[in-house]
Structures are given as structure tokens and as C-alpha cells.
Amino acid sequence: MTARTSAESTRDIPEATVARLPVYLRALITLSESGTVTCSSEDLARAAGVNSAKLRKDLSYLGSYGTRGVGYDVDYLRYQIAREIGVTQDWPVVIVGIGNLGHALANYSGFRSRGFRVVALLDADPTRHEEVVAGIDVRPFDDLEQIVRENGVAIGVIATPAIAAQDVADRMVECGISSILNFAATVLAVPAGVDVRKVDLSIELQILAYHEQRKAQADTA
Amino acid sequence: MTARTSAESTRDIPEATVARLPVYLRALITLSESGTVTCSSEDLARAAGVNSAKLRKDLSYLGSYGTRGVGYDVDYLRYQIAREIGVTQDWPVVIVGIGNLGHALANYSGFRSRGFRVVALLDADPTRHEEVVAGIDVRPFDDLEQIVRENGVAIGVIATPAIAAQDVADRMVECGISSILNFAATVLAVPAGVDVRKVDLSIELQILAYHEQRKAQADTA
DNA sequence: AAGAGTTTGTGAACGCGAGAACAAAACGAG
DNA sequence: CTCGTTTTGTTCTCGCGTTCACAAACTCTT
């Protein structure tokens, strides 16, 4: 990892703030589409479901984009956040594993509208290679390297069964992919420098179940 | 909310720990299926992708289920964690919104195998009410109250478009559902006492994009 | 039976994030 | 131009979560 020398735009933003920026961005888009030109931190915080002090602190890491006594220009702030996240540019993405979830992901319009372009759908099962999902041919997993090279893909999505996920991740890393979104129910081992984010549907439900159980215990206490 | 008087099993477990318990549980199940009888905190931590000190501290909130100098009995610890989370019992769940994602969720085997039973699929669109997904009839959204009442449903999953999500949530709360898993791209407002967890696919990708952009900047610096 | 070797459970230190509170800056009225 | 009002940007404090480090407890060998 090279040392950071550039003065501009490389202050490090806390991870917790990074995770909220997309939420603010979505709220700003909604406000913009409803014709709102200016909003206060209070307005935006309510739309994003956070505390207004936290919102202002988060935005202060990006710079000083508001006007005291007035608030924030919705479209201007929207652009600044989008630029900071990096979604003003186009991110090519590959999805591996075209089962039920892979289908849903391929058809998910939220990717396209937010700067992500699905350039390929891959599956190891040859019987799926006839399929066309969301207007995209399903191709053999072995085409991964070529696709990554030709499209400059940096982000991969894993929607395979858990048993296959580590192999897919290894191949992705070999091909030069450095960010992985993992929907498989397994912990991936990857080298340093590769980012993995995990989404596990059943874990979310289990967390809810824990709290639900406690509520039930409290009621019968 | 009633005061907690029961001495046993009501120590409050930190939220961060609760979020990791399902990960430990999954790791233990994998270990158990591979025939492992005993494991050290180091082993389990590696399988779960966390620090072993953190693992031990997390487990210490549940009680003292290990043996010094030996480690943990895999099946025993597995049961204890499952019991603490509440997945030794069966949780009936309804899914509202049977689009691409709703299909994927209805077919997701990870729910069933972890104590969650999908008792109904609901959709507001009458043209879908002919469909049978994952062996379950798709029914009108207005049947929600009856289904919740008859099955004692406490957990609802929202997989509708963002525009409909708040209405669905309101109706769920009215019917007595007190835990909601929200896949729609919107922030839900719910009364106190109702838990909401949000899963937003495009937000996860945006977080990856942010880090990817920084890596690219670092390389060209 | 005693000592060497493991591994858990936990006390203590540390760092990060949340929220309160306020000073600084912009606007508008008179 | 000045004063009051509004709202941002930032400082400060507090609490939570992570990690280290070690004593307590158990096993095994001799």
C-alpha cells in the first residue's frame, strides 16, 4: 500500500460514516425528485432516519457543503456525496451463481440506477448456459478471467451455494477482483487488500428472533 | 415494558455480540457436520472469521460453557447458542411482495433449516394470486391479519418496491407483528417496541465502491 | 502427586463513535 | 448598518466495543 501524499480528498472518513453516506444519498435523491431545492440537516436526518447532529458530523468529513442559517442545496450535496462514494462513475460488476438469488440480483434495478452495470452472469452448471437473464447471457464460470480483463471489473458478487463460495472467491482474486459482495452463508478467506462484505439473510432473521424472544420473555415475566 | 425480575437468562447481551452469535452458530454447525467433537476458541474464531479474544468474551455473556485446558464441546455449545438466540423454537414468518426478490426469499432453504417457517406469501397484485411459489400459494395482502392471527406470526419480511414498504409496515404493526426485515430501499418509521432490520443490496455495493475508488486513487498517487 | 503445558474467562486499557452543546456564519428586518 | 434568528460546523464528553494480558482451571506426563 502506497503512502498517501495527495492533500485533497484523501482525509480518511470513518467506516461508520461511509456506511451511512449511501443512505443520505438515497434520501437526497428522493427529496430532489419531490422538487425540494434546499433542506436543513434536520430535514435530511429525518428522511435518513438518523440524528441530525450525527448527520452534520458525517457531512463535515466530506467538506463544508452547507450554508449556515440556510441548509444544504439538495442537488449540490447529492452530487458531492455521489462523487465521494464514487458512484458518479460506472462500476462494472459480475455476478456468479445464477440460482434464485442470482436471478433476483440480475433483475434488481437498484444496481443499474446507482452506477453499477452487470457485465456478466456466470454459472458453473452447463445446463444454465442456455439461459438469458435480464437480457444477459449466462456464461461458463471459466470465462471469468476474460470478462474481468475486457471490462476492467473490480467488483464481484457471489450468489452461489456456500460450498462453492470460497473457490469462486479465490478465482475472483486471481483475476484481479478486489471487492467482493458475498451472499453465500460462509466466511471467506481473502488476502489483504481485498474487501469483502457479507449479506446473510438468515443471520438478520436470527437477530430479530433473539429480540423477539426477549420481548416474549418480558411479557410473561 | 415490564421490569425484568427473572434472575436467569436475562442478563443483557451487547448488540454487537448478538449480531455475531448466528455466525458462531453456523460455524459450529459446520464443525459438527465435519465430525469435530471439541474445538478451542482459536479454532472456532478462525472458522467464524473473528478474533479469539472477542469470541471468548462474546461466549462469556452466555455463561461458562467451555472447559479450561480443553475447549468447547461443539454440540453442547451449538445447542446453547441456538437456545439463546431462540432458534430452537419454530418462528412463523410472512413474506410480503413476491417479485424477483420475494421469489428468491421464498425458495431460500436457509430459513427453513434455521428455525424459520414461511407460513404465507402475500402480494397486492391480483394477477399474482394464481401463482404457487415454493409450494406456497400467493395470497392477497388483505389476508395478512387473518394469517398473523391464525399462525401467531411475529416476524414479517418486506420485499416490495420502496413506495409500498411504509404502508406494508404500518399494516404489519397493526396486525401485531413486532419484528420486520426490510429489503425495500426506504427508511421505515415504526412505533417503539417494533424492531426493524434493513438489508439494502445497493448500499453494500456502494460501500465497496467507495473503498475501491480509494484503492484506485492510492495506486495512481 | 506434583509440575509442565493448555486453554478458558475476565479485568483493565484503549480507541472509536454517538450525542449534546455551543460558537461561527449567513440571512432578513428595520 | 445593526440586531435577532436560523442553521451549520466543531469541540467535548460519555459510553460501548475491541483487544491485551493474565490468573484460574483443567489435562497429561512422569
Image (spheres, coloured by chain):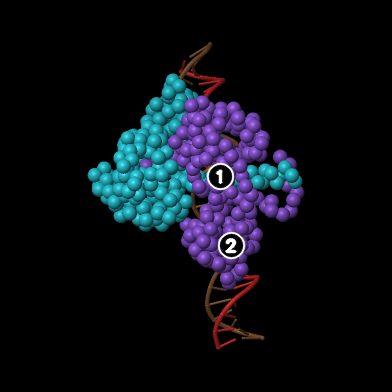
Chain colours: A cyan, B purple, C brown, D red
Q: Which residue corresponds to mark 2?
A: B75
User: Which amino acid, mark 2?
Assistant: Asp
- Which of B49 and B124 lies nearest the eye of the viewer? B124
Residue B3: image quadrant is top right
Question: Helix or strand or loop: what does disc 2 sit on?
Answer: helix
In the visual, does A164 lie left or right of A217? left
Q: Position of residue B35 (x, y in %)?
A: 52, 65
Residue B14: % across, % down: 60, 50
Local crowd at mark 1 within 10 Å, few (<14), some, or many (≥20)?
A: many
Q: Is residue B49 left or right of residue B178?
A: left
Are there few (<14), some (14-19), or many (20+) residues within 10 Å of tag 2?
Answer: some
Q: How many marks?
A: 2
Return the mark for residue A42: none
Q: Which amino acid type is marked by label 1?
A: Leu
Residue sitting at x 54%, y 38%: B136
Observer able to see residue A155: no
- Residue occupied by mark 1: A205
Have a look at marks 2 and 1 and say if they share a chain.
no
3D distance between C-alphas at marks 2 and 1: 22 Å
